[in-house]
Image: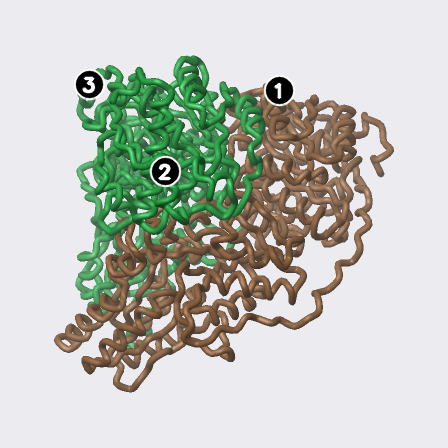
Chain colours: A green, B brown
């Protein structure tokens, strides 16, 4: 059937079909969230049959609406909807949650109709904001972004970052539907069935709101029509519903969260049995094919060897140049673009620069949304503050999107601002992201090259920059492949190899000069690619020198030292390993004082090498 | 002087003194944020002289008000206030931002009057909510919590989690003062000087709001009086101010953020010169001395060896028992207490159980606020969702507070729910926290003991639990010292040592049984204390077996494998090391299927040992 011209009772029937299918899926799996699916079934039915513009045969169509199920635990509803759309069949529906099934416990983009993974609550709206921004300012296609969220997740601060951002950006192509079913997993939500509580808050931020009975298909239809017709601001449809609607054994009852229905067969009977309606959604919006990359080759900035240039400066300058060469590159700022130097891009390409204010979850979520729409986002703030968005980074990896995150003001070397501003855990955080790439250049030249290279690296790329100036040590022709490292000093007499990255490369070079005067020759390696690390080079250095010393402006746990150790995690004989890094909580001091106090300056490196070399002579 | 009875002009004078001192401090340091201090100087003056109940000689007095400078970059203002209160002298003021000075770039509790570190924006209000909850429900002392925040930081979602929470809890002992100076670090804020924009939002959440001219001391005084007199809801004083107020060269001008004034001498002249008023704040509120711990010894649950018990169950049961033995223990939940089993505590001690709903930043922030008030908080949610609060954990370490965080549903073994719900990065995150303790018990007995032991461990303690049942392998008399490990199988014929924690301990024991049948003897270690790890035992195992294999239900980066490798980071010869852990992004499957797919089940461990032992024979 094509329900767009259908009667309300057909919509109600479709809602029942979705309920039945959600129950069947969870029953087959023996787990899952049928009751949370049943509350939103009528909403989903009306959305699919009357409002969603989507070609399920061509999920990549640029004119498709986007549907984000923020309450990802209600995945049975989503999969029931896919069956109603003819995208999957009953047999597949019943593979729910089983090994190798695409129908996972929470939706992921293993399914071609899922843009982003959900299941960590409070992420759908912020990511939807990113998609809506892309629709309005980048794609310039009138697709609509529909976000279906639960009521419990409205407690997440990330939702309110998005509420603020969407209103500020006047995202009238974004609709939030809140399934207010009153019950969270352990009992009543904070606001219960007080629809007005949600409306009051959203309106204060500038949203258009509608309160409806979420089981009245005509009311749902009218609200979604109203939302689509509203201009100048986003719309929230606040729908009062019953968890487990339609089945007396579970309807609006506590203790029924996240489990199959006690008697699925009886419940399906109560709902009128299995149905097999197929619904054709409205066709995609007209969308001009996006033009390819802008012409013009990439003209990266060039730095003179010996000049002192902060890598954050090179980052901003390279980003601006990259934006000229490639029109898919977009940059997002969290109100610190003058510090991260992302504002260099803003000056050249203001139309592709997005200000997210001090809201790091929204910063990363917007980048995820844009990446899901095919853009190439670079999101930037202080390395320390990216920890705010850790859960969004984690979920971005599950979403398998490709995006670039840059953290400035790495390490104790920032100096006087003190520990709150120091990125000291960022390498640990980004190394633990599956499939991530972690880059930490030591000079302007390397930074510029890596900014450009990162644009084509799949997955999540993290690039770490330094606040203060560091000498340019590489010539303009130098290449920096991801996964590589540079041997900066080497001889056949090397008694140890110092492995550094970023600012400690310069300290290590100075340490090597000090030691050379004492007759101790050490190798120095710039491990600019922290993940993947250059295993072959490290193994060679270990074979030839027997001792590796890692030096990092980062905590000892999870950073460069661990990365280097992992190069020997294949069972091969391991060299002696010593790690220098930041212990404890620093205070205020100059950058040089901080490096010394942390034991990662040239003198400290030299001292560590002397000790290690002496020990190696005693017990070789 | 005692300004509480003083005239408005004396308050204005005090405001000028604070401005002058902020300028002097930043000028001496050569960096810092004088203009952000100057906008809030009149507010601080009136607060100190007329409203703050505080004995600067006895910062530990339980009846003191709490003052949280959420806009921590305005530290020069705070330090100027301390001078006006007679707590520091001019000489110390001028040590601002220098090495070893207590007056850091952003305030930390190295100063006895600072309860919690600030500088990561958007944290003051959520932490203040924790303090206000403690005042109302735990200390039961009528101290007031004053939070001074900037306008830019109102974009942080964490602020809105706190706004919601404070209104819901009717925290009339909490006052938020927003210094709306219109300018962020890179230009105008989102709402500029639109005080109404902030008021509308806060009122929608149920706050009492007042809009004032933040440079009118009489208006400030009236507003703070009104705030203190308002009952049943928190109050926000929204103060319109000028950044750099009082000095024409910088007042309300862009580009003047975060740097000393261009001509400090001239600015001080313009402000009327240096002043030396000393102000006595009002005395602390009456506070009954808190009674010591509740009587009654600790009666931990006991589990029978061989029974299958989930460590999360043991966690909840032990927590309830601990709460009976100690009345300083409080528990915080993020609407998943039935999953983490924290609800066992709620049943026994509802008056010390705090529901934070799905707002993990507020969850941890409330715990930080309570810890700063001397309570012993245990905050619990899924391990995966603690990543939401990463920045709060990071700052808690800078605040040097002691608190316990528990993450349930660790690893792929949760099964069908899929990757969004799996804690796979939590060990990496918590290991990188300075001074942290990371515990990961494998059975109910160990869990109960570690819950109890953690109550007296200083700093941030993380405890990781497993969703599914695991066999009890320890007897009731077993002790689990922090920093220890257990050798579960050992012989003189051991060819390798498998180091596991949590669920992989059981897989490793099974692997050892399989290998034993093949004539390969392996040692098995339960590294329940991941940080600090039992270095001595690992070194001994390495010496005796030559090969270590780590097995963890966590990513390869930053977890147990890295912890074990660090036991050899002192330059000693390193054993062969092999790591088994989770690579890539899992889908849905049963727990057993997940462990197998990740290569961390018994069969996989056995296969790895076989390979390693064979290799060792080829190249010993």
Mark 1 neighbour class, 10 Å CA radius: few under 14, some 14 to 19, many 20 or more: some
The C terminus of chain B lies in which quarter of the figure? bottom left
**Which residue is situated farthest in the bottom direction here?**
B492
Q: Secondary structure at mark 3?
A: loop
Quadrant occupied by the N terminus of chain B: top right
Q: Which residue is mark 3?
A: A289
> A318 above or below A591?
above
On the rendered structure, is B344 left or right of B170? left
> Which residue in the protein does label 2 denote?
A310
| Element marked by disc 1 | helix
Q: Disc 2: which chain?
A: A
Task: Mark 2: give few (<14), some (14-19) or many (20+) Cα within 10 Å.
Answer: many
Question: How far across and how far down the image is residue B387, in percent?
Answer: 43, 47
Q: Which residue is mark 1?
A: B196
Q: Nearer the viewer, mark 2 or mark 1?
A: 1
Q: Quadrant of residue B511?
A: bottom left
């Amino acid at each position: 059937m094509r329900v767009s011209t259908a009667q309300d009772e057909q919509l109600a029937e479709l809602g029942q079909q979705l309920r039945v299918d959600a129950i069947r899926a969870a029953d087959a799996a023996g787990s899952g969230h049928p009751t949370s699916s049943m509350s939103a079934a009528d909403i989903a039915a009306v959305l699919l049959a009357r409002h969603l513009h989507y070609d399920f045969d061509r999920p990549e169509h640029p004119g498709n609406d986007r549907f984000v199920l923020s309450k990802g635990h209600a995945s049975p509803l989503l999969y029931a909807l896919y069956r109603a759309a003819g995208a999957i069949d009953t047999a597949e529906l019943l593979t729910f949650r089983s090994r190798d099934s695409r129908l996972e416990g929470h939706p992921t983009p293993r399914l071609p109709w899922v843009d982003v993974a959900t299941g960590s609550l409070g992420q759908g709206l912020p990511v939807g904001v990113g998609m809506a921004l892309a629709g309005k300012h980048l794609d310039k296609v009138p697709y609509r972004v529909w976000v279906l969220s639960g009521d419990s997740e409205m407690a997440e601060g990330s939702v309110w970052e998005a509420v603020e951002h969407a209103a500020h950006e006047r995202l009238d192509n974004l609709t939030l539907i809140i399934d207010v079913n009153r019950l969270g997993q352990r009992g009543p939500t904070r606001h219960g069935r007080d629809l007005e509580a949600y409306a009051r808050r959203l309106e204060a931020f500038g949203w258009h709101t509608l309160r409806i009975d979420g089981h009245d298909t005509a009311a749902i239809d009218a609200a979604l029509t109203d939302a689509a017709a509203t201009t100048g601001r986003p719309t929230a449809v606040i729908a009062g519903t019953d968890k487990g609607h339609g089945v007396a054994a579970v309807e609006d009852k506590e203790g029924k969260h996240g489990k199959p229905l006690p008697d699925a067969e009886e419940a399906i009977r109560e709902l009128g049995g299995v149905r097999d309606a197929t619904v054709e959604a409205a066709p995609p919006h007209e969308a001009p094919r996006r033009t390819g990359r802008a012409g013009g080759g990439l003209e990266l900035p060039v730095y003179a060897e010996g000049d002192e240039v902060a890598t954050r400066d090179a980052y901003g300058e390279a980003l601006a140049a990259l934006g000229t060469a490639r029109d898919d590159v977009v940059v997002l700022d969290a109100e610190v673009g003058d510090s991260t130097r992302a504002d260099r891009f803003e000056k050249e390409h203001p139309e592709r620069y997005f200000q997210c204010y001090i809201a790091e979850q929204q910063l990363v979520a917007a980048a995820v949304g844009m990446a899901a729409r095919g853009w190439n986002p670079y999101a930037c703030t202080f390395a320390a503050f990216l920890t705010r968005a850790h859960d969004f980074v984690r979920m971005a990896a599950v979403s398998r999107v490709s995006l670039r995150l840059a953290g400035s003001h790495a390490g104790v070397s920032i100096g006087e601002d003190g520990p709150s501003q120091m990125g000291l855990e960022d390498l640990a955080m980004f190394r633990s992201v599956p499939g991530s790439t972690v880059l930490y250049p030591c000079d302007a030249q390397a930074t510029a090259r890596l900014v450009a290279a990162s644009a084509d690296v799949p997955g999540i790329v993290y690039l770490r920059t330094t606040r203060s100036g560091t000498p340019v040590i590489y010539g303009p022709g130098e290449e920096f492949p991801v996964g590589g490292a540079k041997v900066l000093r080497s001889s056949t007499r090397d008694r140890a190899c110092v492995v550094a990255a970023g600012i400690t490369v310069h300290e290590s070079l100075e340490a090597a000069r000090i030691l050379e005067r004492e007759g101790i020759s050490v190798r120095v390696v710039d491990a600019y690619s922290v993940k993947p690390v250059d295993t072959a080079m490290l193994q060679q250095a270990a074979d030839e020198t027997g001792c590796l010393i890692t030096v990092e402006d980062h905590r000892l746990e999870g950073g460069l030292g661990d990365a280097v150790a992992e190069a020997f995690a294949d069972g091969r004989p391991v060299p002696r390993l010593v790690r220098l890094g930041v212990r404890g909580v620093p205070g205020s001091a100059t950058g040089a004082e901080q490096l010394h106090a942390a034991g990662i300056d040239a003198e400290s490196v030299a001292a560590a090498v002397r000790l290690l070399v002496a020990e190696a002579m005693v017990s070789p």
